[in-house]
Amino acid sequence: VVGIEASDELDAARRLARELGVTILLKGSVTHVVNQLGAHWQLPVATPWLATAGTGDVLAGILGAFFSRLRKHLESSPADLGEVVAAGALLHALAAESASRARAGGPITASDVAEHVASVVGRTLRATS
């Protein structure tokens, strides 16, 4: 919405999350996740190439996979949903960055982002083991 400051959007998301008892993913150049308990995760600035048609569908797929894999855990610990959403959004941003690097920093498509998800997961797992 034109004329609304980022801090106003974040405040509104916090109020809405609290009032509805939900977790909200607020996408933008800086992504925020807020939950009903007031927890807040702020992700680093993502590549502007993520503002490309279809990349939100890739994010939805990542989150769907996370939710499917972690369903039982999230049912017993719903407060962890915010962390899962933030992790999915971070994976999405890292895959987009990787895809853009593969194109010398140039523009990417949603398919490019999707193609880089597995290699980002692999690098992350290798780095944490």
Image (cartoon, grey):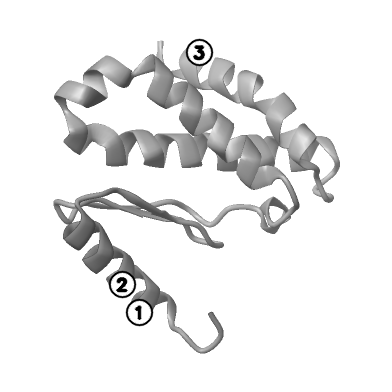
Amino acid at circle 1: Asp
Q: Badge 2: few (under 14), some or many (20 or more) residues near its Cα, within 10 Å?
A: few
Residue 117 position in % (x across, y down): 63, 26
Q: Residue furthest front?
A: 20
Q: Distance between the residues labelled 3 and 1?
A: 39 Å
Residue 76, percent across and down? Answer: 15, 22
Amino acid marked by disc 2: Ala
The image quadrant of residue 40 is bottom left
Give the mark nearer the N terminus: 3 vs 1.
1
For mark 1, what is the residue? Answer: 8
Kindly check if marks 2 and 1 are in contact, taking CB atoms under 8 A apart as contact.
yes
In 3D space, how far apart are the residues under numbered discs 2 and 3 (Cα atoms)? 38 Å
Q: Is residue 42 above or below residue 102?
A: below
Disc 3 is placed on an element classified as: helix
Would residue 15 appear left or right of 65 to someone viewing this image? left
Name the element at disc 2. helix
- Which residue is painted at 43% across and 51% down in the image? 43
Q: Distance between the residues labelled 2 and 1?
A: 6 Å
Tell me if residue 5 comes above or below residue 97 in the rendering: below
Residue closest to the eye, 12 or 96: 12
- Residue 1 left/right relative to 8: right
Q: Residue at x 22, y 67 (%)?
A: 15
Q: Residue 81 carries which label?
A: none
Q: Is mark 1 on a helix, strand or loop?
A: helix
Q: Which residue type carries mark 3?
A: Arg
Q: Mark 2 or 3 closer to N-term?
A: 2
- Label 1 packing within 10 angstroms: few (<14), some (14-19), many (20+): few
Image side of residue 62 versus residue 85, left or right: right
